[in-house]
Image: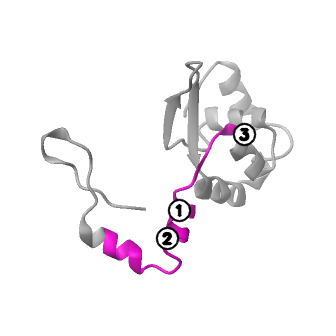
Amino acid sequence: LISVLGAPGGGRPRVHEDEIARLREQPGFPDALVERVRTVGTAQGAALLDIAPARFTRLARAGCVSPVTFYLNRYRAVVWLYLADELAAFAAREPELLAGRTPPGMRTMLESGADWR
């Protein structure tokens, strides 16, 4: 998406000016870039895939979709965020996982408490 440079001394990562120029030249800038990096939580992700939030959580725990970041909310619960573009690509690539029964191997893994996020 965007290449960054590690800051000397372990500071915040920086985006080189050539990378910024490249991004500005792309068609649809800045709206296209905003859409490419849009993140969604569990409820929004489930709505995007047109599935129940519980099923979305199971797919995430099984490692089917990977979060890009997380944070602790005011109740100290972990909130996972996913790239909306990656969720749409997953839905197009694996439509059979969005409906019907969970595959037996995945179900066994989830019942054992595995979380591959």
Q: Residue at x 81, y 50 (%)?
A: 50
Secondary structure of the residue carrying tag 1 is helix
Q: CA gap, disc 1 to disc 2?
A: 6 Å
Q: Are marks 1 and 2 in contact (CB under 8 Å)?
A: yes
Q: Which residue is label 3 attached to?
A: 43
Q: Is residue 2 left or right of residue 38?
A: left
Q: Which residue is label 1 attached to?
A: 34
Amino acid, disc 1: Val
Q: Which residue is label 2 attached to?
A: 30
* Whether residue 48 can be seen here: yes
Quadrant in the picture for residue 89:
bottom right
* Residues packed near mark 2 inside 10 Å, few (<14), some (14 to 19) or many (20 plus): few
Q: Residue at x 50, y 31 (%)?
A: 71
Secondary structure of the residue carrying tag 3 is helix
Q: Residue at x 56, y 41 (%)?
A: 81
Whether residue 96 appears in magenta in the rendering, the answer is no
* Residues packed near mark 1 inside 10 Å, few (<14), some (14 to 19) or many (20 plus): few
Amino acid, disc 3: Ala
Q: Position of residue 24 (x, y in %)?
A: 40, 75
Q: Is residue 47 left or right of residue 66?
A: right
Mark linked to residue 64: none
Query: Farthest residue in the front direction?
Result: 74
Q: Is residue 102 above or below residue 74?
A: below
The span picked out in magenta is 20-42
Amino acid, disc 2: Pro
Secondary structure of the residue carrying tag 2 is loop
User: Which sits in the foreground, 100 or 14?
Assistant: 14
Q: Position of residue 52 (x, y in %)?
A: 81, 39
Depth check, mark 3 against mark 2: the one in front is 2
User: Which sits in the foreground, 21 or 1?
Assistant: 21
Q: CA gap, disc 3 to disc 1?
A: 20 Å
